[in-house]
Image (spheres, rainbow, N blue to C red):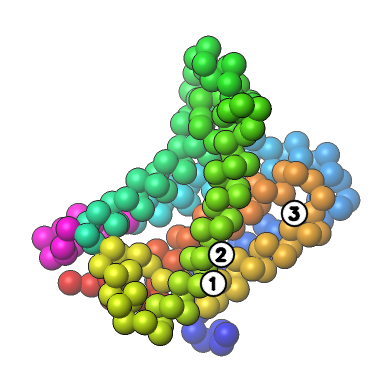
Amino acid sequence: MKIKTLTQTDKLAYLFLILVFGLGIYYANTNLQYFDEVYTKEDGMVEYGTAILLFCSSILLLFRFFKLYKHKKTLWKIGILGMALVFFFGAGEEISWGQRIFNVQSSEYFIEHNAQGETNLHNLVVDGKKVNKIVFSQLLTIVLVIYLLIFPFIYRKFKGFKNLVDSFAVPIVKWHQTIAFLVATGILVFISSNRKWELYELAFAVIFFLIFLNPFNKKIYEV
């Protein structure tokens, strides 16, 4: 990967992640209490940063949806609108749909079935198992592996797959974006706290914003 292949936005985003993860490693290994209760706390900088970036991805996709609506086919509209809704949902879930911000009390159902007593789906407990672990961790890991490592190869080799992906407006990662994900994953080894996943979620939000902003197949956002 050559530095000159990175845009200015890429460089700033990766510098931001290096700083955030660097401080995370430092605090996790020198002051674990500060790491857990301040640096990666609920409603803290890291969590809000993740929510904001997920929301920005959603807004970016919606902007392109309305800008190119008259020029694109139905499948393209379905694909980009679907991704926009998924990332809007992710942003809402990250901050429990503003429950703590606006001091809204959870309903009895969420108090009883949510691991944190909050109004969100990813912390629900079903038959003693957290939805977050099954769907948002295990399933998402599989999806990310396929999307980041397998899709780019297939896209470059098979025209039929390329046309299908482009028709649904699915962005294909550039290799430096895949590498960034792998590096972020590897760094977690140096952080023992379970709160480290907050940093990983932030990395996810940052890198996916970069993917939507400037994918390998950027022509899907052209007239």
Image coords of residue 36 (percent x, y): 76, 40
- Residue at image point 74% right, 58% down: 188
**Magenta segment, which residues?**
61-74
Q: Where does label 1 land, which residue?
A: 149
Secondary-structure class at tag 1: helix
**Foreground disc of the pair 1, 3:** 1
Image quadrant assignment for residue 23: bottom right
Q: Where does label 3 land, which residue?
A: 24
- Residue at image point 45% right, 37% down: 92
Above or below, 130 relative to 165? above
Q: Where does label 2 land, which residue?
A: 145
Q: Characterize the local packing of mark 3: few (<14), some (14-19) or many (20 or more) Cα atoms within 10 angstroms.
A: many
Amino acid identity at mark 2 = Val
Q: Characterize the local packing of mark 1: few (<14), some (14-19) or many (20 or more) Cα atoms within 10 angstroms.
A: some
* Distance of label 2 from label 1 (alpha carbons): 6 Å
Image disc number at residue 89: none
* Distance of label 1 from label 3 (alpha carbons): 27 Å
Amino acid identity at mark 3 = Gly
Residue 67 is a magenta residue:
yes
